[in-house]
Structures are given as structure tokens and as C-alpha cells.
Image (cartoon, grey):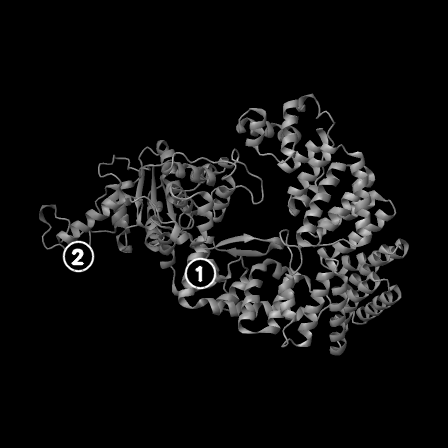
């Protein structure tokens, strides 16, 4: 039987196949021509297949290229996936260029962005390879027969809208062409047997909070890309100490995504980095200036993201919009609540597979999800258009209330609810604003109280006082919610030394709890009220309240409450000169919390134990207690400045490390000043005596440098520094193979004074690059990891 010839474009039978006719009409012939043009950058390409020609430089991605090379040596199919604008195409082109010599039969490029008909995938690939599709059998068979045993690399670009047909074709080719390797770029993996998925993320950025100057910043790929693209539109632009902070912040706010950074850099022709950074909140309108020759999907950031959104099904589109309203990383539980489903796992998996969601492993193994900020802003716009915002806000309120309400009538919130709230601190603001907007004051009170329970290194415990006062002023509050807020207010004022207000709110909470008849929360109010009584000199009354609080807590069988009350009583007795009576109390408290409590609850108990050791001049034990206390609060940072002060006093007592002690005291003082935490008179006296002692024996230059480095350290950096074992360095800088030169010692001293590399260079008559090289050498010789550590070393070893 003679096979009937078919049109290569539409597949319809050809009525006249004589003379090699391949198309049934001029329309099909023109369509085939357009598709061939879309897959080739040069119609005169050589036999090995041309890659798209890049008109600007390729920046960074060295580690990614190395990893791709390693994968390609071991696997025949790699899917390079990532969000819009991550630079998948550019990386694939660079990979192909680098490995041309490894494929004697060619590196073949097939762009599928303009192919809208899934049934045409095979024809587009065949056309790019110069293969005439057979009319009597599947296109894949014809391509496989042509490729055969050739050693070649096939690069299929932009496959996300054609996944099923690309997957079918690739599987067939790999099965029949043993030396063929395939690299696919897509926003979603093909899910083919043997596929290796390589997720492409952000360009390299400086660590958050790390000091970066104009000399060091260009070493990071994101900053270097911004500089190169900015210089393309303004040859006079250069990175300076005045602009480096804005450029780094801009690259970070753009998630390190190459497309967004390139579009932002083009605005340098009109705006300064600070101007661009100020407008980056409206980035979808700002980042619209790509070259005219750029793929239409990448002309604007909005178009790049919209392409991905349009490929989602209806449920995924709704989920993407509603999750964007959260504006904060979220776990599966909160995502399910926001999306209004029992379990959002499949929705999250689908969005992550399509590179519209990023998953991170958080503390204690919790998986958190987040949207890149540009994607979130796009989703938020659509959420507003679809009316999703109030729906999500109401669901957030429900979620917060479900977490907080069971804890409101306990002496202290349990560990798991606090962990959940710590992970979702940002959505508490949504709950607070929404409940105030709709007048839901009971749940407003719950959200405000939850704010007081949360903590992280950037936000010590506490709730803004105006918000707290406004919530307490609502006449509609039920007694249980008013008592909860009154207790929060009493604790707020106790931490800040406002004892009159502390006693007033503690009294209100106690009166309300007495009427409600809840023993646990009555004990909660009594503990604070007892502390206030003792502060004002009513020791008999205060100790009687402590005893009543303990009785109530023991009666209800709450060991956590007993431990907290015992520690408060121990701290009170220590402040009033009775360290012997304080010792067994805090010992019992520590034992109870170790057995029944959460790790961070040890923090105040260990601080009290350390303070008792200080009172007895047992400085080694004190240092051990304060370091353990710092360690206990790493997950849920609570009052770490207290422990820094205690450790500093222990170091001063031993004389082991005066420079470290001065730095830690400076950090703690900065935190107290910023958040208005006032030390109790007893503790302030200890700090004053210790400070006088250390300053009396420390050279003025070293003291200034140590205090300067301490003021510049964040709380996280100070805690890391306090817990790091520092090798004892000889005063001359070390052994002969690690000797520090006088020039290096001088530069280290200037770093300790807070000067930038440019300022040091101007003072010494050398370039900033030379200064940076000296600093790098010093840090390498001494094994120091940061400029803060170098500043502390300089304070110890320079005059």
C-alpha cells in the first residue's frame, strides 16, 4: 500500500505530492518558515547549530556552571528550572558555548518560546536540526533516525508551556539516541525518568547584615551584574562608599534575580541608586526598560511573571494571589488557612514546581515557604483586583486566634504555639490591623498579646506601647482579654523600670483574675505584683504574694509556673542582699524547667544563677552560666543583652578578656538605649563597678576601639562573638610564620576606629584595593571571620 503524503505543517493529506511538495497551502508554508526562524538566530547557521549570540557580558554563575558540567558528565537529561528572570537561558547558552568541543556532532539550540501549538514541538525541533520529518511515521522517529549514534547536545529553551509534548519527545530521543544529551530550560521540570533537576536561584549576594564596602561588593555576582549593566547606560557611574549600601540593598530587595537587576541598572541613566531603591516598591512599573531586541516576555518584569501566572490552573492562580497577601514566609498550616482549604500541600507543591514558590528549612525542621518579592507584588496586585485581600485577612485573624486563644488562660504560653507565632511574626500585623478595622476587639487583644510573646534577634520581646494602651482602652473588652493585656502591660513596664505603672497594671490583672477565679492566671498576676511590692520596699507583702502564687501554681500542677515564680523570687532575694536564700530557689527552678520546660525558658533562671555566682566572686561559674543562658535563647532570643552584661562582668572579674567585656557591654548598652530597657538598681550598680574597674586598667585607645566595635555589632553578631572560643594570641601578633606587620597592625587599628577602606586609603596615601588586601591578609593570618572580630583584636593589640 502506498502511503498518503501529508502536509508537514498541519498534517492534512496532500492531493498532489508530486515534485516534492511538502505543504498543502501557502499559509502552511509561511507558518513553517516562521517557526524555523524562531528557533534559529542566524539563517546561515553552520552544521553544528548556532547558539544565540549575546550582545553583553555573562556575569557570575561560576559555581552553577561547574555543577552543571558535573551533572552532564553523569546524566543525559538535565532540566534547568527557575523563576522568571533567573537567567536560565543565558546560563544554558554559556554552558553550550563552554562545551562545544565536547560534542563533535554539535550543540543544537531550539527556542520554543514562540511555539504555541503543543503538536508542533517535534516539527520545530526537526526544523532546527535540519531534519525533514517523515510523512509516514511519527516525527520523533524521524529525528531519532537522523541523530542516531551521534554525540551531540540538544538545548531546548523555554519549555514550560509545552511540558507534556517536550517530555514525550525527549524521552523518545534519549531512548533511541544513546550518545545524545539534552539540557532543558523551563520554569517547571519535565518529570521524565532519569531527569536531573537543577534549580537556579538568586545571584550571589553579601550576607544580610555583613559590612560591605565599595571594594568588596563587586566580588558578589549580583552587585557586579548591576555595575556592568549600569555602566552600559552611564559610563561615568562607579561604586563608591556613598552608593555601595544602596546598590547592595537594591540587589537584595530584587531577590538577586538577574532580569530585575538588569532592568534596575538601566535606570541609572536617570536615577541614583538611592532613587531606584526608594521606588523599588513599585518595581513592576519601574522595571520596564529592556532593550528592544529582548524577548517580549522579558521586556518588563511584569511580562516575565505574567507568563508564568497564565500557565497556572485556576486553583493555583487563586493560591498564588492569596499567598501573596501574607507578605511573609508561611508554613503549610497558615497557607492552608489563607487558601481556604484543609490541606494546601498539593497547591504549594505545584507552585514550587513552577518556580513560583521557594521552600526553606526553618528552625527545628519546619518547612517554610515564600514568594520572591517581585512575584509577591504581582500576586498582590491581582489579589486586590479579585477581592482576595479582605478574605485572606479574615482567615489570618481566624488562624491567629486559633493559636493564641488557648494560651490566654495559661500562666505562660506553651512552646509550640510560640514557635508558630515566631515563624509568622509578620502576619500578626495583619491580624492587628484587620481586627481594629472591623471592631473585633477580643481577637484584637489576642493578636496584640501574641506580639508580646514573639522574639527574634532583630526584635526583642515587647509590644509597642501606643498599641498596647489603645487596646486596653477599649470598653468592649471581656474581662479575660483585659486581664491578659494588663499582664502584658505590667511586664512591659517592669522590663523598662516603670514600676509605678507595672504595679498598677499588675493590680488590675490580679483583680480581674480573682473575679474570674482562674488559679493559673491569678498566680501569673501575683508574680508580677509581688516583684513590684518588693521593689517599693514592702518585702513582707511581696514575699506573701510570692508564697500565694507558688501555692496556686503547685495546686494546679503547673511546673513551668512554679519554676518561673521561684526564679522571680530568687532574683528578688538576691537584689535585697540574700544570695544564700536565693540559691536553692533558683536551683529548683532550673531543675523544673530542664525537666518540663522549653529551652529558652532556662534563660532567666541561668541568668539569676550567674548573677548569684558573681555575688560570690565565682567568676568562672558565672561565665559558664551566662554562656549557657545565651545558648538556651538562640532559638527564641529573650533578653540576651542581660546575659552579655553578665558574661562581661564575669570576664572583668577574671581579667581574662577586658576588650571582649567592653565590646559586649557596649552592645548591651546600645540595645537597652534603643528599646528603653532599664536595669534594676542592683544590676546597674554591678555594671557601674565593673565598668569602672575595666576602664581603669585598659589603655584608652583599646577601650575606645572595643566599645566602638561593640556598638556596631548586631545582637546576633555579639552573641556569636560571646560564644566563640578565641585563641589566645601573643601580644606581638603570633609566631614568625603569622607575624603581623606594623602597616597591617596600623590598618587594623583604623578599621577598629570605624573608618572605611577609602578613608583609610586617603589617610595613608594608598588605594582602597590595597587596604582591602592588607585587611584580608591580617584576617587570614589570625583566623578571623569578620571585620568586627578584627576590630576587637585591634583593640587588644594596638595602642
Q: Nearer the viewer, residue 33 or 438?
A: 438
On the image, which quarter does residue 174 sit in?
Answer: top left
Q: Which residue is mark 2?
A: 12
The quarter in which the C terminus is drawn is: top right
Which label belongs to residue 479? none
Residue with the most extreme top position = 736
Q: How would you rate the neighbour count of disc 1 (Cα within 10 Å): few for under 14, some for 14-19, many for 20 or more?
A: many
Q: Which residue is mark 1?
A: 380
Q: Are marks 1 and 2 in contact (CB under 8 Å)?
A: no
The quarter in which the N terminus is drawn is: bottom left
Residue 56 picture location, percent across and down: 35, 36
Q: Is residue 536 above or below residue 718?
A: below
Give me the C-alpha separation between circle 1 and circle 2. 46 Å
On the image, which quarter does residue 550 sit in?
Answer: bottom right
Count all numbered tags in the image, as a single digit: 2
Residue 445 picture location, percent across and down: 63, 70
Q: Nearer the viewer, residue 313 or 275?
A: 275
- The residue under the point 56% across, 63% down is 429
Q: Nearer the viewer, residue 66 or 550?
A: 550
Q: Is residue 141 left or right of residue 564?
A: left
Q: Could you tell which of marks 1 and 2 lies nearer the N-terminus?
A: 2
Label 1 SS: helix
Q: Is residue 253 above or below residue 414?
A: above
Nearer the observer, disc 1 or disc 2? 1
Residue 43 in view: yes
Q: Nearer the viewer, residue 606 or 278?
A: 278
Residue 256 in view: no
- The residue under the point 48% across, 42% down is 247
Label 2 SS: loop
Residue 3 picture location, percent across and down: 16, 53
Q: How would you rate the neighbour count of disc 2 (Cα within 10 Å): few for under 14, some for 14-19, many for 20 or more?
A: few
Residue 718 picture location, percent across and down: 68, 44
Amino acid at each position: 500500500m502506498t502511503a498518503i503524503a501529508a502536509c508537514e505543517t498541519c498534517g492534512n493529506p496532500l492531493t498532489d505530492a508530486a515534485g516534492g511538495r511538502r505543504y498543502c497551502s501557502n499559509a502552511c508554508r509561511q507558518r513553517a518558515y516562521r517557526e524555523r526562524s524562531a528557533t534559529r538566530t542566524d539563517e546561515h547557521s553552520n552544521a553544528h547549530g548556532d547558539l544565540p549570540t549575546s550582545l553583553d557580558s555573562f556575569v557570575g554563575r561560576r559555581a552553577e556552571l561547574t555543577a552543571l558540567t558535573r551533572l552532564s558528565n553523569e546524566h543525559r537529561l538535565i532540566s534547568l528550572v527557575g523563576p522568571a528572570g533567573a537567567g536560565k537561558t543565558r546560563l544554558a547558552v554559556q554552558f553550550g558555548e563552554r562545551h562545544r568541543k565536547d560534542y563533535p556532532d554539535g550543540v543544537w539550540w531550539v527556542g520554543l518560546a514562540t511555539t504555541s501549538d503543543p503538536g508542533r514541538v517535534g516539527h520545530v525541533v526537526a526544523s532546527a536540526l535540519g531534519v525533514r520529518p517523515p510523512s509516514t511515521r511519527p516525527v520523533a522517529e524521524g529525528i531519532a533516525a537522523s541523530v542516531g549514534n551521534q554525540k551531540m547536545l540538544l538545548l531546548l529553551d523555554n519549555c514550560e508551556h509545552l511540558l507534556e509534548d517536550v517530555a514525550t519527545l525527549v524521552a523518545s530521543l534519549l531512548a533511541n539516541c544513546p550518545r545524545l544529551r539534552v539540557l532543558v530550560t523551563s520554569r517547571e521540570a519535565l518529570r521524565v525518568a532519569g531527569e536531573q533537576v537543577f534549580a537556579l536561584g538568586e545571584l550571589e549576594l553579601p550576607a544580610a547584615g555583613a559590612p560591605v564596602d565599595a571594594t568588596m561588593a563587586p566580588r558578589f555576582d549580583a552587585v557586579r551584574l548591576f555595575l556592568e549593566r549600569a555602566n552600559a547606560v552611564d559610563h561615568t557611574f562607579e561604586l563608591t562608599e556613598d552608593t555601595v549600601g544602596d546598590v547592595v540593598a537594591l540587589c537584595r530587595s530584587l531577590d538577586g534575580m538577574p532580569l530585575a537587576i538588569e532592568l534596575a541598572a538601566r535606570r541609572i541613566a536617570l536615577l541614583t541608586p538611592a532613587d531606584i531603591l526608594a521606588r523599588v516598591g513599585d518595581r513592576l512599573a519601574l522595571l520596564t526598560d529592556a532593550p528592544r531586541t529582548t524577548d517580549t516576555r522579558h521586556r518588563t518584569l511584569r511580562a516575565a511573571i505574567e507568563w508564568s501566572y497564565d500557565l497556572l490552573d485556576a486553583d493555583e492562580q487563586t493560591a498564588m494571589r492569596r499567598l501573596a497577601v501574607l507578605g511573609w514566609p508561611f508554613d503549610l498550616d497558615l497557607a492552608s488557612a489563607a487558601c481556604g482549604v484543609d490541606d494546601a500541600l498539593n497547591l504549594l507543591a505545584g507552585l514550587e514546581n513552577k518556580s513560583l514558590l521557594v521552600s526553606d528549612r526553618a528552625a527545628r525542621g519546619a518547612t517554610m515557604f515564600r514568594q520572591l518579592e517581585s512575584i509577591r507584588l504581582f500576586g498582590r496586585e491581582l489579589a486586590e483586583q479579585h477581592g482576595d485581600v479582605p478574605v485572606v485577612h479574615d482567615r489570618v485573624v481566624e488562624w491567629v486566634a486559633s493559636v493564641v486563644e488557648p494560651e490566654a488562660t495559661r500562666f505562660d504560653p506553651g512552646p509550640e504555639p510560640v514557635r508558630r507565632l515566631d515563624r509568622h511574626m509578620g502576619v500578626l500585623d495583619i491580624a492587628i490591623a484587620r481586627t481594629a478595622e472591623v471592631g473585633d476587639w477580643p481577637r484584637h487583644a489576642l493578636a496584640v498579646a501574641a506580639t508580646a510573646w514573639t522574639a527574634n534577634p532583630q526584635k526583642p520581646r515587647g509590644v509597642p506601647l501606643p498599641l498596647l494602651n489603645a487596646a486596653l482602652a477599649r470598653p468592649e473588652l471581656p474581662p479575660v482579654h483585659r486581664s491578659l493585656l494588663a499582664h502584658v502591660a505590667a511586664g512591659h513596664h517592669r522590663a523598662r523600670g516603670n514600676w509605678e505603672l507595672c504595679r498598677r497594671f499588675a493590680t488590675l490583672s490580679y483583680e480581674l483574675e480573682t473575679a474570674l477565679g482562674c488559679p493559673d492566671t491569678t498566680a501569673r498576676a501575683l508574680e508580677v505584683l509581688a516583684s513590684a511590692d518588693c521593689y517599693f520596699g514592702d518585702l513582707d507583702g511581696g514575699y506573701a504574694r510570692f508564697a500565694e502564687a507558688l501555692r496556686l501554681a503547685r495546686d494546679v500542677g503547673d511546673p513551668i509556673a512554679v519554676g518561673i515564680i521561684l526564679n522571680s523570687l530568687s532574683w528578688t532575694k538576691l537584689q535585697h542582699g540574700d544570695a544564700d536564700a536565693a540559691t536553692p530557689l533558683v536551683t529548683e527552678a532550673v531543675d523544673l524547667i530542664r525537666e518540663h520546660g522549653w529551652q529558652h525558658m532556662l534563660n532567666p533562671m541561668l541568668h539569676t544563677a550567674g548573677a548569684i555566682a558573681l555575688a560570690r566572686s565565682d567568676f568562672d561559674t558565672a561565665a559558664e552560666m551566662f554562656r549557657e543562658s545565651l545558648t538556651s535563647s538562640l532559638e527564641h532570643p529573650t533578653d540576651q543583652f542581660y546575659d552579655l552584661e553578665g558574661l562581661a562582668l564575669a570576664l572583668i572579674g577574671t581579667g581574662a578578656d577586658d576588650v571582649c567585656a567592653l565590646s559586649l557591654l557596649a552592645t548591651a548598652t546600645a540595645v537597652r538605649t534603643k528599646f528603653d530597657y532599664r536595669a534594676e538598681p542592683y544590676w546597674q550598680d554591678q555594671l557601674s563597678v565593673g565598668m569602672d574597674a575595666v576602664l581603669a586598667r585598659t589603655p584608652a585607645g583599646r577601650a575606645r576601639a572595643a566599645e566602638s566595635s561593640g556598638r556596631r555589632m548586631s545582637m546576633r553578631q555579639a552573641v556569636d562573638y560571646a560564644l566563640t572560643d578565641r585563641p589566645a594570641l601573643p601580644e606581638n601578633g603570633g609566631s614568625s610564620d603569622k607575624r603581623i606587620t606594623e602597616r597591617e597592625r596600623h590598618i587594623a587599628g583604623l578599621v577598629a576606629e570605624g573608618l572605611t577602606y577609602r578613608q583609610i586609603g586617603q589617610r595613608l596615601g594608598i588605594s582602597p584595593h590595597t587596604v582591602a588586601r592588607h585587611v584580608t591578609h591580617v584576617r587570614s593570618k589570625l583566623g578571623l571571620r569578620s571585620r568586627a572580630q578584627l576590630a576587637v583584636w585591634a583593640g587588644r593589640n594596638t595602642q
